[in-house]
Amino acid sequence: MRKTRNYLLIFGLTAGLMIVGCAKKKVTAPPPPPPPPPAPSASLSVNPDSIQQGQSTQLSWRTENATDVNIEGLGAVEPNGSKSVTPTGSTTYRLAAKGPGGTQEATARVTVTTPPPPPQITETEEQMFARNVQDVFFEYDSYDLRPDAQASLTQAAQFLQQHANLRFTLEGHCDERGSTEYNLALGDKRAAAVKEALVKGGVNGSRVNTISYGKEKPFCTESNEQCWQQNRRGHFVLQK
Amino acid sequence: MHMRRICFYLVSALILSPFCLGQQDWIRTGTGLGVEKIRLAVPDFKAAGTETQTAELLKTFNDTLWNDLDNAGIFEMVSKSFYPLQVPANAQEMRIADWANPPTNAAMVAFGSLGAAGSEAVMQGWLYDVKNSSSPQILGKEYREAGTADGARRIAHRFADDIIFRLGGGIPGVAESKITFVSSRSGHKEIWQMDYDGAGQQQLTRLASITLSPRLSPDGARVAFSTFNNRGVQLGMYSLELGRPVAFPTFGGTNLSPAWSADGSKLAFSSSMRGSPNIYVADASGSNVKRVSEGSGPDVSPVWNPKSGAQIAFVSGRTSLPQIYIMDADGTNVQRMTDTGYAVSPAWSPNGQFLLFAWRRNYGPGAPGGQDIYIMDIATRQWVQLTHDSGVNDFPSWSPDGRHIVYESRQGGKNEIWTMLADGSKPHVLTSSGSNTQPNWSFK
């Protein structure tokens, strides 16, 4: 059934075409006027459309039917092209495409962000204190200052003289070996030895508060020499 | 813990004792230690009455009494397996021949009964000299205390002390004495107190700081100690009557290790109030402070001669490693007592003749051995080592009768309070919870 109907349709169309082809021309038409010149088209894009100050971005444009293409700030450009730009601030680029058919404009905006200011490299007093006034370490059962401690305290004294507003506590600490009571006395001698070196280096003794913790507040709790050495110390604490 | 204790006894008995005794003669302490011991039989006391709580009180009483007498150091306790079948509850039931003859072969017998009367525990106790058939009774007495476990223990302590006083050369027993110490079991180092046998451990201070070096006053009413405040370690005073710390002056510098004179009127302590840590003496109130030791120190851990009150032993690092010194209480006549090693924590015996201290004799890198308790005869400076191969030992303190020592021992990484007889025998541990250090035995 369906096939039969298709045949009928084809036959009908063919017949119709033959009838038109056989129609006779009556008049000759005048020549048509020349078509008006086509209007120009233009597009402008920027990629990426958001940059940080100092970075570049790519400006691309296309025009048609234009004889004179200008981009504000860049001057005359080719009808189609692209250019890398480095605006210092957010900018709206304007393209004007002029041709016989008129003028077409296109715009594209790039947003320029200012980067966050780099972190200012200024130390707090606490950081400066920690860098310049370092803990000193002792030999077993000794409160004598070792050469490394002497050198460290010379630096500390210079810093403390330059920062006369800083007050601090000097803690004497001992390792876990030996008597609780004797170690408290030994820690007192250690703190006193460090204070004396600072006073000799010109630091006013009234800025220093000494305290012995003996072996009561260890920095390290393992029973080996490495740990014991960590605990035999004069420890500085900045008073706030 | 039990196994370790057994091992310790075995090691002491089998190896150490012959080794030590072979090396050096025991110093005679004049306290009955080291002489032939009295064979004492102590059958379990019988229940008087049928109160239900009696059985429990009776067990506490019997265990405590046996322990007190066994620990006294002057008795050979006759094993209960050799006792006659019939155990007397009172003097009428006592048949002395059964106890004097083999196999019991006792010299003395302590016996009696305990019952409840209302809220009280009532004990009737006798001590018989069973070799004296004509007049055997040495002691016959009734004791009353609260009908609680504490009361039962207290009756046992009082009875044991009465027996020890009569048979131990007139020296009062120590069963009612106390030991103060430092324990960290609350999370902070605080002062604790316990009975001499480790029973009744209770916290005294609640300072939530680091509290150290408790020293009971001779009258037992106060504890002097050291504690940290924001200025460092300072002296403090705790009243057992008020149950709280009482005011005590603070000084500059590091202040620690207070020690009572035997009359309770003075305290010696270490202070850096005027520079180096030296020994100072003050009134018990903290006033009239005087420096008595000189030099760069550090000087620490003073103790008075309790007999004379005229001398002080202390530790000084004036020649590098700490050594034991004695001096007159005004700071004159300083004598160095130890010749080498690391010597700390002196304790002066009640009779004035001996010093106990902790000594690491073989000090040096890689040197073998731990830190041990030593006893020294002051007159001759002859010394005997009392602990052996038992870790790090420190802070010995004498019992009031001079027959016992309490000390701190670190074995297997844990500090505990131990006690032993003054000849180094019968060591046993008294604490088990937390870190326990710096024991101090009461004056009486």
Image (cartoon, coloured by chain):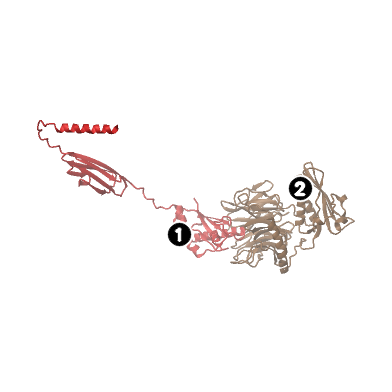
Chain colours: A red, B brown
Question: Residue furthest toward the right?
Answer: B134
Q: Residue at x 52, y 61 (%)?
A: A137
Where residue B327 appears, x then y in whole percent? 67, 63
Foreground tag (1 vs 2): 2
Q: Nearer the viewer, residue A240 or B402?
A: B402
Q: CA distance from mark 1 to mark 2?
A: 70 Å
Q: Is residue A14 left or right of residue B178?
A: left
Circle number at residue A158: 1
The quarter of the rendered structure image containing the C terminus of chain B is bottom right
Other-residue count near label 2 (Cα within 10 Å), few / some / many at <14 / 14–19 / ≥20: many
Q: Quadrant of residue A49?
A: top left
Circle 2 SS class:
helix
Circle 2 is placed at which residue position?
A: B152
Q: Residue at x 74, y 52 (%)?
A: B176
Residue B306 visible at all: no
Tell me which chain the residue with mark 2 is part of.
Answer: B
Q: Amino acid at mark 2?
A: Ala
Q: Nearer the viewer, residue A50 or B377?
A: A50
Q: Residue at x 60, y 49 (%)?
A: B208
Circle 1 SS class:
helix
Q: Amino acid at mark 1?
A: Gln
Tell me which chain the residue with mark 1 is part of.
Answer: A
The quarter of the rendered structure image containing the N terminus of chain B is bottom right
Where residue B345 appears, x then y in whole percent? 65, 60
Residue B147 visible at all: yes
Q: Nearer the viewer, residue B216 or B265?
A: B216
Circle number at residue B81: none
Where residue B389 appears, x then y in whole percent? 66, 63
Q: Quadrant of residue B387?
A: bottom right
